[in-house]
Image (cartoon, rainbow, N blue to C red):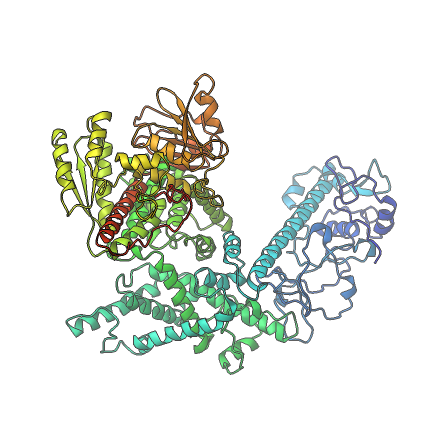
């Protein structure tokens, strides 16, 4: 096929010069262009007609002559354009993929204007409606909305133009008030043709009329290009999802799916993706059908056991017999009453769910939701049904119903001979393959099927078979979601309380002035944020925006309904910071109970998600990092035959020590430890420590320093038995740390050495933030990293520098006197670190800090602030002092910022306590001649006696 000539992409430049060619070269292909255009010979030219009216028809005729009858209605036949659909249409069989559309590739299919039937482009390969109805097929989607398509009678302009149905954007005539405002001379001038100074043979209008026409033409051209770019983007995303979901016959790559889904899932594929992301649908395709069949049957069996069928059929009241699924009661009538009360509460809540949405007003929909919620409640007696769970149920029902409608539309198109088999993207079991489902057959025969969406479909048309499937899928996916936020709905809802507190702490890091204003007005976060956590913002945003938000939540690992949601709520609150700062108590609460989000679009939500992502990555809360260790430690405590006891000694009035003691008590209670705080006078502390060492009921001892000062405090540290020193401050443990020795009993290496809990917490934070390179060998995972530690105390600063240097980092340790360098050398051949004093003149802080990857501070003074200008862009910044060592501006420069580490430190302290208990068990078993029982002993060989820093599995 001969190469086509380039089309004209622009008519006039800003200087009113005539422009040709793809890149606007002047005079390019001029003769060919003039010959093909035939503008000067057109009988409808403005010059010949006089064009004194400047009306819409004149403008359309001008443009039809310039662009070759580009659907301006001049001598062009309507070929059934149709508007851009929300769902991809079917492709002709054998079609592998649909070509991407661009401004330079828009082609009119002139060969099809003879009325020959055209097949529709693939729904699987192209996620936008391109259509001409198939004559006689009975499948003619949205014919009522057909609009003129681009047609071009000039073959030379038929180069790489795909047939695309764009929204009708015909040029509108100038507004009458605009024309009326012109003088008679101006109106006359505006309708008179003038000659272009560069190309006299090309006539164009002048004055206000021509200028307006040109502006409208430019606007139309820009709109067309934007529409094409949007279609290209949709097509590309759909193709990427299709590749991940359908290309590999063995299974779905979940990492790739999460990465794609974070930025939004195509509506057609959302149900399938959600089921995969929630772990309900197996990634192994050979197991999907059987798994869904089994889970759906389990749901039906559950309803039967709960007697829910008769309870929710709309005609029968709850049975007089208890289902037996609620907690047992001494009084059978009480159990029965509880079930009736539960049924009543769910019924009234469902009736109030999304009242403005038609789908949730249908009896069939409400009956399905009641079944799902009732079964979930009786199967989860620890929490039971809580108002708000009804809201969380609705997105699943809506999405799964929408997916069923989409499958029917594709099936009908495929049966009519349009496109490849779409079943690779279907959720198994929804479509009836036997043809015996009369309800489904009626829907397939409905001429309105192509226009059905979840918004206009009557759920009462569903067959009992499909209704049960949608209910079952909704039930199991809801269960998977709630499993991740169970603490939000158990007694006293501790999960929500924690999230609300985390939100307040986060706002204090992001916008302290907003926090101060809320507190000055007496506004407590629980007053407005409780509902945000309980209902996941479903009362604040439309369901369409919630669905988009859940795409991202489900892509987070772990699911984003817990921690990530707190950051989203922070971004949501910050959106209104300016308005809130101008309001008083009552106005603030009224505003936050009904925030102005009715005009929000997906772009607003995506911006909010992006901000939350940045804050989550930049400002890391200690509670977030500690959570995985809290879970691990709690499970280990439950496995013990006794309750470990920790005793803390407080012999000062230091506020930071008091806070640390309070945190210790709360964390111990939460994780199943017994904790006792013993307050003693300074001079009584020595005897108190000796007494605790000899108390067999005490498993761990800690002291909240400082007491006297360095020398005397070190003596007190050594008084604590190595078997009970949870802080790892004994000289034995210090010796192992500084010499990079990991175990207490070489060469068997079964009893792990104890590390100081605060430095160990810092190591775990750096692991969490990805500073440790997991691809390197243990002990070398910080190779190439430079770390600045602004603290050289014997409790935290010096041990921390040694830990990090032993793991391969170059550490600069700063105190009031000088800077020291901790390193194992450039080649890391040394067994342990060495320390070098640096000349402050040669290595001032201003030179050292900007080259560091990590900056850690621990100066116990509110007056000390690390210079923000010395923080490298993108550096990891950690503050472990009770005082804030950084100004707020550090958040703008730091890549990741951890303002406090207390909760991680306490987690490490309790982890050390479990290590001490395990070490004692090993010693007792060895002494009795039994096995070691060291289930967690390392199996490493070689230099295993070293504290191999698996990010310091150091530990």
Q: In the picture provided, is 446 more to the left or to the right than 685?
A: right
Residue 707's place in the image compared with 262, above or below, is above
**Between 873 and 304, the one nearer to me in the picture:** 873
Q: Quadrant of the C terminus?
A: top left
- 31 to the left or right of 839: right
* Relative side of 593 to 694, left or right: right
Quadrant housing residue 18: top right
Residue 171 point in image, percent of width and height: 68, 50
108 and 82: which is toward the camera: 108
Question: Is residue 591 visible to the viewer in this orientation of the structure?
Answer: no
Residue 825 visible in image:
yes
Residue 639 occupies quadrant: bottom left
In the visual, does 511 lie left or right of 344? right
Q: How far across and down, in percent of the image, does residue 251 sit? A: 53, 64
Which residue reaches farthest top?
Answer: 841
Residue 330 at what x, y percent from top left? Answer: 15, 71
Q: Give x and y (percent) for residue 851.
A: 49, 28
Q: Quadrant of the N terminus?
A: bottom right
* Front-most of residues 339 and 439: 339
Q: Residue furthest bottom?
A: 436
Question: Up-down: is 497 above or below 835?
Answer: below
Q: Quadrant of residue 753?
A: top left
Q: Residue at x 53, y 76 (%)?
A: 443
Q: Is residue 680 above or below residue 118?
A: above
Q: How many marks?
A: 0
């Amino acid at each position: 096929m001969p190469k086509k000539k380039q089309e004209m992409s622009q008519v006039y430049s800003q200087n009113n010069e005539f422009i040709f060619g793809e890149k606007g070269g002047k005079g390019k292909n001029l003769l060919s262009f003039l010959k093909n255009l035939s503008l000067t010979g057109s009988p409808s030219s403005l010059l010949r007609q006089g064009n004194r009216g400047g009306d819409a028809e004149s403008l359309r005729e001008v443009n039809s002559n310039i662009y070759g009858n580009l659907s301006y209605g001049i001598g062009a036949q309507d070929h059934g354009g149709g508007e851009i659909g929300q769902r991809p249409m079917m492709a002709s069989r054998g079609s592998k993929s649909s070509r991407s559309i661009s401004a330079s590739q828009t082609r009119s299919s002139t060969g099809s204007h003879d009325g020959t039937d055209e097949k529709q482009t693939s729904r699987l390969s192209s996620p936008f409606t391109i259509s001409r109805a198939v004559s006689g097929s009975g499948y003619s989607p949205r014919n009522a909305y057909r609009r003129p398509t681009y047609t071009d009678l000039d073959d030379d302009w038929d180069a790489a133009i795909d047939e695309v149905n764009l929204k009708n954007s015909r040029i509108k005539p100038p507004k009458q008030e605009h024309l009326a405002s012109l003088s008679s001379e101006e109106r006359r001038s505006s309708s008179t043709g003038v000659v272009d100074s560069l190309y006299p043979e090309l006539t164009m209008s002048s004055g206000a009329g021509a200028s307006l026409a040109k502006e409208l033409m430019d606007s139309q051209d820009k709109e067309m290009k934007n529409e094409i770019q949007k279609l290209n983007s949709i097509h590309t995303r759909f193709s990427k999802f299709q590749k991940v979901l359908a290309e590999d016959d063995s299974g779905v790559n979940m990492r790739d799916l999460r990465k794609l889904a974070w930025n939004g899932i195509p509506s057609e594929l959302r149900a399938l993706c959600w089921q995969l992301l929630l772990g309900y649908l197996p990634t192994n395709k050979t197991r999907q059908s059987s798994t869904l069949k089994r889970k759906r049957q389990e749901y039906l069996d559950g309803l039967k056991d709960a007697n829910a069928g008769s309870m929710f059929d709309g005609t029968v009241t709850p049975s007089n017999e208890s289902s037996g699924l609620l907690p047992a009661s001494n009084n059978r009538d009480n159990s029965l009453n509880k079930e009736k009360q539960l049924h009543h509460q769910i019924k009234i809540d469902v009736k109030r769910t999304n009242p403005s949405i038609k789908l949730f007003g249908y009896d069939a929909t409400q009956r399905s939701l009641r079944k799902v919620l009732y079964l979930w409640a009786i199967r989860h007696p620890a929490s039971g049904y809580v108002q708000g769970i009804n809201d969380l149920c609705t997105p699943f029902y809506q999405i799964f119903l929408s997916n069923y409608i989409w499958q029917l539309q594709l099936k009908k198109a495929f049966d009519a001979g349009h496109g490849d088999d779409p079943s690779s993207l279907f959720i198994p079991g929804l479509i009836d393959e036997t043809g015996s489902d009369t309800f489904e057959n009626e829907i397939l025969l409905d001429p309105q099927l192509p226009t059905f969406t979840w918004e206009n479909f009557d759920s009462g048309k569903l067959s009992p078979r499909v209704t049960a499937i949608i209910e079952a899928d909704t039930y199991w996916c809801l269960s998977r979601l709630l499993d991740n936020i169970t603490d939000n709905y158990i007694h006293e809802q501790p999960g929500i309380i924690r999230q609300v507190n985390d939100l307040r702490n986060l706002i204090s890091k992001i916008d302290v002035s907003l926090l101060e204003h809320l507190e000055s007005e007496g506004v407590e976060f629980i007053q407005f944020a409780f509902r945000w956590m309980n209902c996941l913002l479903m009362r604040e945003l439309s369901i369409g925006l919630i669905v988009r938000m859940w795409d991202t939540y489900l892509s987070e690992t772990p699911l984003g309904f817990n921690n990530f949601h707190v950051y989203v709520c922070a971004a949501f609150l910050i959106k209104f910071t300016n308005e809130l700062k101008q309001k008083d108590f009552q106005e603030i609460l009224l505003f936050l109970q009904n925030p102005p989000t009715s005009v929000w679009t997906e772009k607003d939500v995506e911006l909010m998600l992006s901000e939350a992502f940045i804050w989550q990555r930049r400002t890391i809360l200690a509670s977030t990092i500690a959570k995985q260790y809290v879970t691990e430690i709690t499970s280990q405590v439950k496995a013990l035959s006794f309750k470990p006891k920790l005793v803390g000694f407080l012999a000062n009035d230091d506020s930071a020590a008091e806070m640390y003691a309070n945190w210790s008590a709360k964390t111990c209670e939460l994780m199943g430890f017994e904790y006792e705080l013993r307050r003693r006078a300074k001079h009584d502390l020595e005897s108190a420590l000796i007494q605790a060492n000899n108390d067999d009921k005490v498993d761990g001892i800690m002291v909240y320093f400082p007491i006297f000062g360095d020398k005397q405090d070190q003596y007190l540290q050594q008084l604590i038995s190595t078997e009970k020193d949870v802080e790892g401050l004994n000289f034995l443990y210090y010796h192992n740390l500084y010499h990079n020795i990991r175990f207490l009993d070489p060469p068997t290496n079964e009893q792990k050495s104890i590390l100081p809990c605060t430095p160990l917490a810092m190591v775990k934070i750096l692991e969490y933030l990805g500073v440790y390179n997991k691809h390197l060998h243990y002990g070398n995972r910080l190779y190439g990293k430079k770390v600045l530690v602004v603290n050289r105390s014997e409790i935290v600063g010096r041990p921390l520098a040694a830990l990090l240097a032993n793991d391969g980092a170059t550490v600069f340790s700063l105190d009031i006197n000088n800077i020291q360098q901790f390193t194992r050398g450039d080649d890391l051949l040394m067994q342990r670190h060495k320390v070098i004093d640096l000349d402050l003149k040669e290595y001032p802080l201003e030179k050292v800090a900007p080259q560091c990857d990590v900056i850690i501070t621990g100066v116990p003074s509110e007056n000390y602030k690390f210079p923000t200008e010395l923080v490298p862009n993108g550096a990891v910044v950690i503050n472990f002092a009770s005082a804030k060592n950084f100004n707020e501006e550090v958040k703008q420069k730091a890549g990741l910022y951890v303002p406090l580490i207390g909760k991680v430190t306490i987690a490490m302290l309790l982890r050390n306590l479990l290590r001490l208990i395990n070490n004692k068990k090993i010693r007792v078993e060895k002494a009795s001649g039994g096995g070691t029982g060291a289930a967690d002993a390392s199996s490493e060989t070689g230099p295993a006696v070293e504290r191999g820093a698996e990010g310091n599995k150091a530990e």
